[in-house]
Amino acid sequence: MTRAEVPPDATVLTELGSARPTHVSYDPARTLQICWVVTNGRARWKLFWVTRRKSGVYLSLPFGPGIHYSYHSDGTFHTRPAPNEPQTPLGKGLALDQFRGIRSLGYGGMNITTKSISRRLPPLGRKPVGRLIVLDNRVLSNWLHTYVWLIEPFRLGLLPLMVDMPLHLHVLTHVTPWLAIAIYEDRQGMSGRAPR
């Protein structure tokens, strides 16, 4: 059982009459995969996925050449710009079980019109996934920008948020460190609205 310290300035919900906790006990998920997919109502394509294993945290962005980012349990951080290319070191940080503060795991952006994604993204397929989040391109902007952050538990105030684009924020608190996934809809810059 892992015990995470609750910072004194963290806002937490407690039952009426209960003391404010100083630590929280939980079993962090050692293996978790969560996949974001785009649908047009007829088909589903993998937009990106995040995997947390004992060995580290991995981000796969299949658009473009297929970028992968990884932050390993010992703090080693690297990227692979394309599946057949060598890894590029991005430095060394704190070990995941000692993680403090915030660090960007990776980012990317893509046109999510059916015409674009049907040529550039893999279909969802039948392989099981731990969690699945579906985004419908019939109601979203043509462009989405994704940012994935490693963040110290209870420190969401460290998360830099853009305020000029609509935001979808997903926070995974059952892994250590927490993962914050910010998806922004670009309603003006790269896209505008166009027929799907």
Image (cartoon, rainbow, N blue to C red):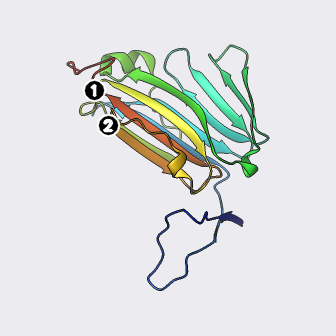
Q: Amino acid at mark 1?
A: Arg
Q: Amino acid at mark 2?
A: Pro
Secondary element at tag 2: loop
Q: CA distance from mark 1 to mark 2?
A: 8 Å
Q: Position of residue 8 (x, y in %)?
A: 59, 66
Mark 1 burial class by Cα count in 10 Å: few <14, some 14-19, many 20+:
some
Q: Is residue 79 above or below residue 148?
A: above
Q: Residue at horizontal 22%, vertical 22%?
A: 193
Q: Is residue 133 above or below residue 142?
A: below
Compare residues 186 and 124 and report the one nearer the observer: 186
Q: Residue at horizontal 62%, vertical 50%?
A: 152
Q: Position of residue 161 (x, y in %)?
A: 44, 39
Which quadrant: the N terminus?
Answer: bottom right
Q: Residue furthest left?
A: 195
Secondary element at tag 1: loop
Compare residues 179 and 42 and report the one nearer the observer: 179
Q: Position of residue 139 (x, y in %)?
A: 24, 34
- Is 16 placed left or right of 98 in the picture? left
- Is 78 placed left or right of 159 in the picture? right
Report the residue marked by disc 1.
Answer: 187
Q: Is residue 40 above or below residue 150?
A: above
Mark 2 burial class by Cα count in 10 Å: few <14, some 14-19, many 20+:
some
Q: Residue at horizontal 61%, vertical 40%?
A: 51
Labels 1 and 2 touching (C-beta < 8 A): yes
- Tell which circle, 1 or 2, labels the residue nearer the N-terminal end: 2
Compare residues 119 and 108 and report the one nearer the observer: 108
Which quadrant: the C terminus?
Answer: top left
Q: Position of residue 153 (x, y in %)?
A: 60, 55
Report the residue marked by disc 2.
Answer: 166
